[in-house]
Image (cartoon, rainbow, N blue to C red):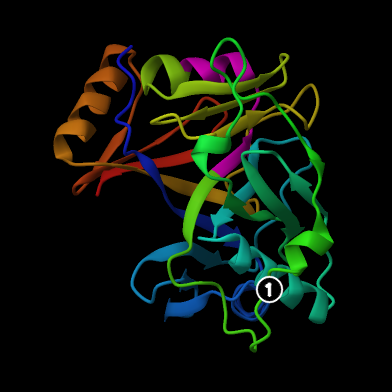
Amino acid sequence: MTPIHKDTHIGSVTLKVRNLEKSVRFYTETIGLRLLTKSQSVAELTADGKTPLIILEGNSALQQRPVKSAGLYHLALLVPTRKDLANILYHFIETNTQLLGASDHKFSEAIYLQDPENNGIEVYRDVDRTEWVRDERGKLPAVSEPLDVQGLLNERETNAWNGIPQNTVMGHVHLNVVSVQEAEHFYVNVLGFEEQTRMAHHALFISAGGYHHHIALNIWNGPNTVAAPDDATGLLQYEIIVPGKQELQKLISALEQDEIPYIVEGDRISLKDPAGNGVVIKPS
């Protein structure tokens, strides 16, 4: 399989929520995104005022996503600098925001939390690529050490919180899947993402262009995990952005060769991965 284009990246993530108003307040007031558009049932949240990063689709009739189901483990907002991450951490502390953890992965520093409907969120900054340490196979070891919180906070700016930086992007998505082997076939053998880190049989981190990961896949929900019901909260779909229509056509050809169904929607396609997670692939 030809590797996917090195400039491929992740676009917006669409979540199904039961309480749209509460979720909008969380993502604007706590996370610091800005409201781009809003209707009775859909809200688009942005960092730069132009590009949606998180789309919320509200429906009070949804059931809570079952614990033993595939779906979103977390979405990951990538901020530009360590100082930006320090400012956000201080904002979380000031607002008594409950955090799930904070880690130093050596290639990134990350803060973890959940939204009001238990969707996982990571806010992180990348360590300079020249400092990433790879093993003898060229892979990135799985490292998760405690974050140097005080060292990070020492870099914060003292001016008032003004929201998440405008050039924040969706750095990666981390997915619960039913089978790592099936997911690997789809994402690596068919689409062409490349392995960066593997954690035994239970997690795989893959990317385009040697990034630490654009997509992570795990079976941490345990055995007997199933696809999430359509009427459950959580991930509806996430976007894979490829640089141009020619790259999109290459992926369409790969999908057809493997007899993987997809739907054409204008200049993009939508499909489901083997675990039932919604994927949209579109050109930049």
Q: Identify which residue, 65 or 53, lies in the foreground.
A: 53
Query: Callout 1, which amino acid?
Result: Arg
Disc 1 residue crowd, few under 14, some 14–19, many 20+, Cα 10 Å: some
Residue 92: x percent and y percent? Answer: 76, 73
Residue at numbered disc 1: 156
Q: On screen, 86 above or below 73?
A: below
Q: Residue at x 55, y 73 (%)?
A: 164
Q: Residue at x 69, y 68 (%)?
A: 155
**Left or right: 282, with 189 as reference point:** left
Q: Residue at x 34, y 13 (%)?
A: 258
Residue 18: x percent and y percent? Answer: 66, 66
Magenta stretch in the rendered image: 173-185
Q: Residue at x 33, y 15 (%)?
A: 259
Q: Does the rendering let one see residue 277?
A: no
Q: Identify which residue, 40 or 153, lies in the foreground.
A: 153
Q: Identify which residue, 176 or 9, lies in the foreground.
A: 9
Q: On screen, 5 above or below 170?
A: above
Residue 165: x percent and y percent? Answer: 51, 72
**Left or right: 37, with 206 as reference point:** left
Q: On screen, 69 above or below 180?
A: below
- Give the residue at the far left of this rendering: 246
**Quadrant hosting residue 5:** top left
Q: Identify which residue, 165 or 15, lies in the foreground.
A: 165
Q: Is residue 232 magenta?
A: no
Q: Does the rendering let one see residue 177?
A: yes
